[in-house]
Amino acid sequence: MSDLFQAAGLGAEVARPLADRLRPKVLAEVVGQDHLVGPDGVLSRMLETRSLGSLILWGPPGTGKTTVARLLASATDLHFEQISAIFSGVADLKKVFEQARARRLTGKATLLFVDEIHRFNRAQQDSFLPVMEDGTVTLVGATTENPSFELNAALLSRARVLVFKALDAEAIARLLARAEEIEGKALPLTEEARFALVNMADGDGRAALTLTEEVWRAARPGEVFDVAGLAEVVQRRAPIYDKSEDGHYNLISALHKSVRGSDPDAALYYLARMLDAGESPLFLARRIVRMAVEDVGNADPQALVVTNAAKEAYDFLGSPEGELALAQAVVYLATAPKSNAVYKAFSAAKRAAKEGGSLMPPKTILNAPTKLMKGEGYGAGYRYDHDEPDAFSGQNYFPDAIGRQSFYHPVERGFEREIRKRMDYWARLRAERGEA
């Protein structure tokens, strides 16, 4: 068999995927994550002490999480052990932990890399805690989902979360140049097609290199692909605008303002244009959820439910079927009553929080778990709202130094009309009871 490969000019090195052959050998070669691996990056500073704590690497696919985990193990002289939460269960974890304990007795520590760590259930995540605490393993977990929602608080308290960014056009371009250097040949693409390939990768370095391999495999001697030819050989739609420049921002702005302006037809038009241009549907789903909380808010509390459900539906169905769920959500938002009252209230609350960040809440609403705290007046005078007339005490919850503040002003539209009635009613009760 080896003779056949040699005759065809295909050695073992060529058989390895391009993404594997381009895998960085040192952290400095990792592209697109300068905030982590650059000269002043978080990981660079950490490795200067050759001391590594447990980490959660959070970011989109193809941004270098696995590669960085391997390089961290090498840089700190740790044994690298990798498992995937998709294919591993409790028995696999126990085996890995036992091997790490045995290895530790020989003086060799273990870096345990867990891909898709958010796939483990709560009990499985808890199983990491003892081996993290006693130093049996240094855990490095990778996830594409928000750790705050998907990982146990106990696990997060023992690990530092590092955010990986989707690769920008410059980082993808550097990967393509490195691939050409290793292959010793240029990509058979026009400048426009090369630009289109960068956008097709959608911030995923592994996807960019896979597309690059497909182009080289498809090209006949002397053949150069234009944008249409590239789309044909890789079987992907070529973006019709630069997602990092004006076209991207102009269309997402037009979509958002059409929703805000209660024009479902215009909103559908811009949604269709962006999908046809090859825009990431999950990027659109995130922006649609943002529209729900920024422009509809509590005027229709179901808006957030509907948009989150649309995102989940797209995850489940994929393209093109899942695109209809995004369209449904866009129409729902465009036809919903509008309010940015929560958006404005939260902005005002954040400004106030910065100004009064060190102010202590009133002692009346603080618990007094010790005699000392009780003697200091903690909890004294607190009135349990459920025991009060109308289940409302009207007491002040703001720091005494600033008194009651007013941030949230519901509009007279949709469900917020009902919220305003409640707030006006409570304001009257405060005034009657002298708590205003």
Image (spheres, helix red, strand yellow):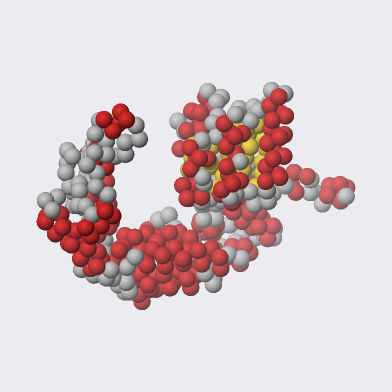
Q: Nearer the viewer, residue 28 or 113?
A: 113
State which quadrant residue 333 falls in: bottom left
Q: Nearer the viewer, residue 385 or 22?
A: 385
317 relative position to 40: left or right:
right
Question: In this picture, is 325 found above or below 42?
Answer: below
Does residue 223 show up? yes
State which quadrant residue 128 falls in: top right
Looking at the picture, how far across and down is residue 422, in whole percent?
22, 63
Question: In this picture, is 335 found above or below 115?
Answer: below
Q: Residue at x 63, y 48 (%)?
A: 85
Does residue 238 show up? no
Q: Nearer the viewer, residue 346 or 423?
A: 423
Looking at the picture, how far across and down is residue 234, in whole percent?
62, 62
Looking at the picture, how far across and down is residue 156, in whole percent?
50, 40
Question: In this picture, is 203 found above or below 178?
Answer: below
Q: Residue at x 88, y 50 (%)?
A: 1
Q: Nearer the viewer, residue 229 or 123?
A: 123
Total numbered badges shown on the rendered structure:
0
Q: Residue at x 64, y 57 (%)?
A: 215
Looking at the picture, how far across and down is residue 88, in whole percent?
68, 48
418 relative position to 206: left or right:
left
Q: Residue at x 72, y 39 (%)?
A: 95
State which quadrant residue 22 falls in: top right
58 relative position to 21: left or right:
left
